[in-house]
Amino acid sequence: MTDTAVRAATTAARALGLTVTDPTVLYEAFSTVVHLKPSPVVARVPLNPPGSLQDPEPAVRRQQRELDVVTWLSEQGLPTVRPSHPVPVEHDGLCMTFWTYVEVDQAAEPDYAGATARVPELHAQLAQYPGELPWMTPLRLIGPGLATAEAVPGLLEQEDLVRARAEWNVLEPILTSQSGFENAFPSVTVQPLHGDAPSWNLITTVDGPLWADFEDVTIGPREWDLAGFGPDLCRAYNKTATTPLDPDVQQLMDLARALQVLVCTPLVPQFPGLADGIRLFAGQWRSMPFAAGLG
């Protein structure tokens, strides 16, 4: 996959008029990120996951949504990694986006509490976004993923699958539609969100911190952007937020994040490093009340 992604990104970049002589992979997981040296441009090429984990929405639509949101945020003065090309580019069956290269501060220590304390600022700006966004897109693969998942001893046991499927039957009507969620939690505000753990996606560059990776930008409760972070980081968020997180919704979002991670089990043969994260989330999930107390 890596070689294919690099070749596609290099060819597509040259077609856009960029000089590329030394493409260098910066990161590889669910996407391959390639610095198109010597051009100050990075290509992000998402992988094609197995059938049950393939998003039914065309990649170009999701990517255009991200580009539109990040461009708007940048225009509002929010520090973000900026697109270098305004639309996604398709080549050899892969759909990719292009971004301005930023130099990461390699000496900086991770400060997740500090990053989390800045998320309310991001949420306040996102709340003003004028474009249309879909509801909770990161969760739409849980149902198909659970339907086809198979037990993996030592990672995802058969009894885990039984519980997860029963749990999703309870949670699906609440989590997969805005009306269902608002009926269950009428006093909780929903708004545009980063969608994918923004505290982990605040990049410390040599020129300062920049928000990045808005691939899962969506509409939902603010608690989704804190899902799986634990009580310490939720407290860090609440210290700078105008309105604190709702603890019941946070528990529900933590559960939803765990289910989202569990359905990634079929990717472990391709990405063995995922196994440790799945075990961590599975252990936390087994200690949670069934369906976050709703079932």
Image (cartoon, grey):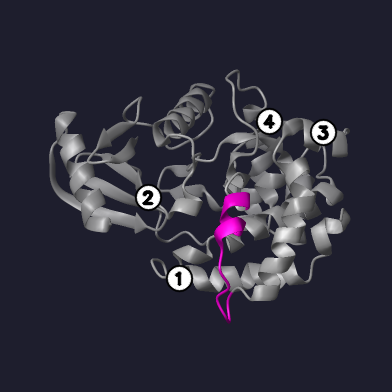
Instruction: Say which of marks 2 and 4 sits in front.
Output: 2
Helix or strand or loop: what does disc 3 sit on? helix
Residue at (13, 37) in percent of width and height: 19
Which amino acid type corresponds to the residue marked 1 in the rendered image?
Gly
Residue at mark 2 to residue at mark 3: CA–CA distance: 33 Å
Look at mark 3 in the image and give the residue it sits on: 182
**Residue 111 appears in the picture as rendered:** no
Q: Position of residue 219 (x, y in %)?
A: 65, 33
Q: Quadrant of the N terminus?
A: bottom left
Instruction: Say which of marks 3 and 1 sits in front.
Output: 3
Residue at mark 1 to residue at mark 2: CA–CA distance: 18 Å
Mark 4 or 3, nearer chain start: 4
Look at mark 2 in the image and give the residue it sits on: 48
Where does the magenta region start and end? 143-155
**Disc 4 crowd, CA 10 A, few/some/many (<14, 14-19, 20+):** some
Which amino acid type corresponds to the residue marked 4 in the rendered image?
Ala
Label 1 near label 3: C-beta < 8 Å?
no
Look at mark 4 in the image and give the residue it sits on: 124
Look at mark 1 in the image and give the residue it sits on: 273
